[in-house]
Image (cartoon, coloured by chain):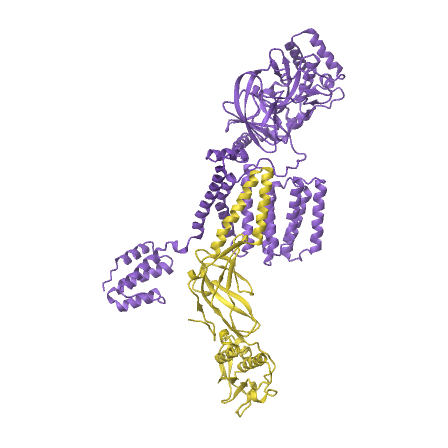
């Protein structure tokens, strides 16, 4: 069972069958529905007073339409299938984005709102799949992730007021969703000169740093490559996006050490380390992360970065939260 | 255009559509007000001008309401209500930035629609109501789903209306109706045409200018001869020297005792906000909704505020000699005034005792002296009867009737004026008469021994064509009010007339069956299906019937609306599943991750013997499923191949 997913890259998680998800669908009038009801009562009273049969006819027509719209609202929400979901790790105080691929039931399902508790509402239509593209019915639902750790957004609220806005139909989906939240980077400490010496507890002959890296060559751009390494010259020549690759001299490895940081606050320490990891990665250094009871590396590259960040995300958290 | 601006044109359109039925009733400034504000909003949206600030909106609101109040003049009646709604319809689009404002604006549109219905309940308005609801609902859907296609919204709007109609019909007929009104009906000011309770020269000629329908009369058998179609309305017995008044009202139980050829008919009376009911001379007895007065006129118990229909029987020739209730009123004349007329009448009375001869003298007097029948008689001075008889000699039916009755009374013959209608237009498509305000007429009745009241129409002495063919034939062309000038349309006039008559038939049926439906009709309908009001079972049955019928419709729609996608038949998939099952039975199931061609490959390696047909089936399946349908015979071939394939272990 995929209980949790720490993501080195995007990956799709398959959700339980749609039948199982169609549990309790609630339907209640919106405040406009209640206002409409009051208007209907006023219309009915007016028609009765003036004995106006056409007034009765209109009142009953509108009332019946509101009634019928309950069925339409219900149909509009039932049968939505959530095919899969994915998310990307975020830093604390960023919005976690959950991307769902959804599929409609019997008919297109329009003006459907998706929301996590306390999150933003995303409204969209679920239309027939046009081709093979998974982007056909991609719904991104955002919610603020405030603390590092494993963020569980809670039940997904799916609701609709379509077609008349008089009734709102909704249900909650208890999906087993998680998003890794890295510590919030706290910048300003990655300076080789001013850095705490033990942070660069190195056994290298050469000083590590951007200036001393040797240019190795160009490779095709991959998402995540540092922007300042993109060869804009090559891009302007029409060769597409290429990234300059650098090599660090062998053995030039840095150590990012928890104990070397002179700070009493755990969270701030993690924030600083997080920032260092990001900078080291941007400079394409080989680095080693030392946390109490755990050492990662030395290594380099995106996978290593995520590994380090994830370790910091869940650092010192009670096991039930992990 | 911003997203919120995309709502503006549809909402303006729905307000406009909703307002059309009463746009001509609105004061001119309100029309300008709406057009100006809407135009401004459209320009604001187009050129991205800043939206008006709150203070400006408030100021405009105050101005608008002040304008309506000034127009209404402290009387908050229907006109003021329509005015307030229209002013709001003009203003509200100025603040449509939020979903809430837009929803409320659409609700206002629904309110405007119902307001339009109080103007008229004709079939045309009914059809238009459905159109307005259709447009407004489409806009409501648009507000709740701003993306999406216009066509789909219109279709959904129509669909919801269609699905609501059966429920609407059940509610319309079964929802309990009350008698009378909840809080009373404000009196509408002017604009109503019809008789008043006093008659003075000019009253009826004013009426004649209106082409509005007064009532329709449907006869059980053939329509009586035209010269008998005198529709009795009010009797004027008391003359004050200037005007004729109704006099004392004494109720009686029944009409003339003797008479010939009772004709049965029913009358659908347009609301005239008075109490009188019209009947063919002479009604036998009052209808259930009214009572009869001593002068054989009928009055309704309540004022006629909506269309009503009642059935009557009348004698076209009658004898009322036994009646004595009238005597004290119909001889009186003012003490002074009109000396010349008195003198003339006295002279006739001196010559003979025979009442018939006196009547004849009067009619001959009109005929001989070249009296002129005209809608535009000159103004009469003091002693109006003398002035008319001896100076102007031009007048309309009320002039002749009042002069004639004056002469008769001066000659000691009891007489009175009857106001009502004469004739009517026969609708050949419906065997009924349309009696319009332009058929308004006044004639006289004289009392003769042994005969009782006898109808004398002095107008016939001056303009016999009026009785025989109606008003259009009598008046010269320049006197004909605009509506009557059909003659000018030339050959199209006939067609136009036919269309109008046909439409009138439809509308009359509509009036009878739809507009006339009220608490009484509901009782009748319910008792026909066995629900009696007196017994306790009645209301229970009533509720059960309503709930039952509504449930049936809801159930039917629920199946239709909420049906599962699997109910849809997909033959291609069905046969392919059958194919897969066949192989699963022999131990080659299709794994969930296997596409059709992978599966075929797998079968191919395991069962070399079936490779060819499996490949063919798979190819067909792929082309039917993912291609563009393939050849017309492909599905048939696919089916037969799947059915044919035999797998032995």
Look at the image and tell me in which quarter the N terminus of chain B lies: bottom right
Q: Position of residue B485 (x, y in %)?
A: 61, 29
For chain B, give the colour.
Answer: purple
Above or below: residue B183 compared with residue B255: below
What residue lies at 71% left-to-right and 43% top-to-bottom?
Answer: B69
Locate residue B618 relative to residue B75 in the image: left or right: left
Chain the render paints yellow: A
Q: Position of residue B426 (x, y in %)?
A: 54, 26
Above or below: residue B87 compared with residue A196: above
Q: Position of residue A133 (x, y in %)?
A: 44, 65
Nearest to the observer: residue B226 or residue B161: B161
Look at the image and tell me in which quarter the C terminus of chain B lies: bottom left
Nearest to the observer: residue B191 or residue A197: A197
What residue lies at 34% left-to-right and 64% top-to-bottom?
Answer: B596
Locate residue B238 relative to residue B568 in the image: left or right: right
What residue lies at 43% left-to-right and 71% top-to-bottom?
Answer: A2
Q: Across the whole image, how many numbered discs are drawn on residues?
A: 0
Is residue B393 among what the camera can see? yes
Above or below: residue B602 compared with residue B180: below
Locate residue B72 relative to residue A300 in the image: left or right: right
Q: Position of residue B52 (x, y in %)?
A: 68, 55
């Amino acid at each position: 069972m995929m209980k949790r997913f720490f993501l080195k890259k995007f990956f799709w998680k398959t959700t339980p069958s749609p039948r199982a998800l169609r549990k309790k669908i609630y339907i209640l009038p919106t405040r406009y529905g209640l206002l409409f009801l009051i208007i209907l009562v006023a219309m009915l009273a007016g028609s009765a007073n003036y004995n106006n049969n056409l007034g009765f006819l209109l009142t009953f027509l509108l009332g019946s339409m509101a009634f019928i719209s309950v069925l339409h609202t219900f149909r509009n929400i039932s049968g939505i299938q959530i095919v899969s979901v994915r998310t990307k790790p975020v830093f604390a105080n960023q919005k976690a984005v959950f991307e769902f691929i959804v599929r409609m039931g019997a008919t297109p399902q329009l003006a459907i709102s998706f929301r996590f508790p306390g999150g933003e509402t995303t409204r969209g239509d679920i239309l027939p799949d046009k081709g093979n593209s998974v982007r056909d019915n991609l719904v991104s639902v955002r919610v603020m992730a405030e603390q590092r750790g494993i963020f569980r957004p809670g039940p997904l609220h799916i609701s609709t007021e379509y077609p008349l806005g008089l009734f709102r139909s909704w249900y909650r989906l208890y999906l087993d969703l998680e998003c890794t939240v890295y510590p919030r980077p706290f910048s300003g400490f990655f300076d080789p000169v001013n850095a705490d010496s033990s942070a660069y507890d190195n056994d290298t002959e050469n000083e590590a740093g951007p200036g001393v890296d040797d240019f190795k060559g160009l490779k095709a751009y991959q998402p995540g490559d540092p922007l300042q390494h993109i060869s804009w010259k090559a891009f302007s020549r029409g060769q597409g996006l290429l990234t300059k690759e650098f090599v660090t001299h062998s053995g030039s490895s840095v150590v990012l050490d928890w104990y070397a940081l002179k700070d009493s606050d755990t969270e701030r320490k993690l924030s600083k380390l997080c920032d260092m990891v990001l900078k080291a990665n941007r400079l394409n250094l080989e680095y080693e992360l030392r946390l109490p009871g755990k050492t990662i590396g030395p290594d380099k590259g995106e996978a290593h970065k995520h590994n380090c960040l994830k370790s910091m995300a869940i650092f010192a958290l009670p096991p039930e939260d992990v | 255009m911003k997203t919120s601006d995309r709502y503006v044109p549809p909402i303006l359109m729905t307000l406009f559509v909703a307002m059309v039925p009463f746009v001509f009733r609105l004061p001119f400034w309100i029309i300008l007000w709406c057009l100006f504000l809407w135009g401004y909003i459209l320009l604001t949206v187009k050129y991205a001008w800043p939206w008006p600030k709150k203070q400006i909106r408030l100021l405009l609101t105050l101005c608008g309401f002040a304008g309506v109040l000034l127009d209404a003049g402290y009387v908050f009646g229907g006109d003021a209500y329509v005015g307030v709604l229209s002013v709001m319809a003009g203003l509200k689009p100025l603040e449509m930035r939020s979903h809430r404002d837009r929803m409320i604006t659409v609700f206002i549109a629904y309110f405007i629609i119902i307001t339009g219905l109080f103007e008229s309940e004709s079939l045309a308005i009914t059809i238009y109501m459905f159109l307005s609801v259709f447009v407004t609902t489409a806009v409501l859907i648009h507000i709740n789903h701003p993306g999406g296609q216009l066509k789909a919204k219109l279709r959904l709007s129509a669909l919801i209306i269609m699905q609501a109609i059966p429920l609407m019909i059940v509610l319309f007929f079964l929802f309990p109706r009350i008698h009378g009104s909840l809080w009373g009906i404000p009196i509408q000011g002017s604009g109503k045409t019809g008789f008043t309770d006093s008659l003075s020269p000019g009253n009826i000629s004013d009426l004649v200018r209106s082409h509005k329908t007064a009532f329709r009369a449907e006869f059980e058998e053939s329509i009586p001869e035209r010269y008998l179609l005198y529709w009795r309305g009010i009797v004027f017995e008391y003359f004050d020297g200037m005007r004729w008044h109704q006099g004392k009202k004494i109720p009686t139980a029944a009409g003339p005792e003797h008479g010939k050829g009772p004709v049965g008919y029913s009358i659908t009376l347009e609301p005239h906000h008075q109490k009188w009911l019209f009947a063919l001379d002479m009604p036998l007895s009052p209808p259930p909704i009214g009572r009869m007065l001593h002068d054989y006129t009928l009055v309704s118990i309540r004022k006629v505020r909506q269309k009503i229909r009642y059935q009557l029987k009348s004698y076209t020739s009658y004898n009322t000699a036994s009646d004595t209730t009238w005597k004290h009123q119909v001889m009186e004349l003012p003490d002074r005034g009109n000396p010349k007329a008195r003198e003339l009448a006295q002279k006739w009375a001196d010559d003979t005792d025979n009442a018939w001869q006196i009547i004849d003298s009067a009619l001959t007097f009109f005929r001989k002296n070249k009296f002129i029948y005209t809608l535009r008689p000159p103004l009469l001075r003091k002693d109006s009867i003398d002035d008319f008889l001896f100076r102007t000699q031009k007048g309309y039916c009320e002039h002749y009737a009042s002069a004639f009755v004056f002469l008769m009374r001066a000659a000691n013959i009891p007489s009175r004026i009857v106001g009502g209608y004469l004739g009517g237009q026969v609708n050949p498509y419906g065997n009924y008469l349309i009696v319009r305000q332009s058929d308004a007429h006044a004639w006289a009745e004289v009392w003769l021994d042994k005969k009782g009241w006898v109808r004398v129409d002095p107008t016939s002495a001056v303009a016999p064509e009026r009785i025989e063919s109606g008003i259009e034939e009598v008046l010269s062309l320049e006197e004909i009010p605009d509506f009557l000038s059909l003659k000018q349309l030339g050959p199209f006039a006939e067609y136009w007339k036919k269309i109008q008559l046909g439409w009138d038939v439809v509308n009359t049926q509509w009036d009878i069956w739809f507009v006339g439906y009220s608490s009484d009709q509901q009782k009748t309908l319910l008792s026909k299906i066995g629900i009696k009001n007196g017994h306790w079972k009645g209301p229970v049955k009533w509720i059960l019937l309503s709930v039952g019928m509504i449930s049936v419709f809801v159930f039917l729609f629920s199946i239709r609306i909420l049906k599962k996608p699997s109910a849809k038949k997909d033959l291609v998939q069905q046969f392919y599943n059958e194919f897969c099952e066949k192989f699963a039975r022999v131990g080659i199931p299709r794994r969930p991750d296997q596409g059709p061609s992978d599966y075929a490959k797998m079968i191919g390696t395991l069962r070399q013997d079936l490779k060819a047909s499996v490949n063919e089936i798979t190819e067909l399946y792929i082309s039917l499923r993912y291609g563009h349908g393939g050849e017309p015979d492909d599905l048939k071939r696919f089916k037969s191949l799947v059915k044919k394939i035999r797998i032995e272990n």
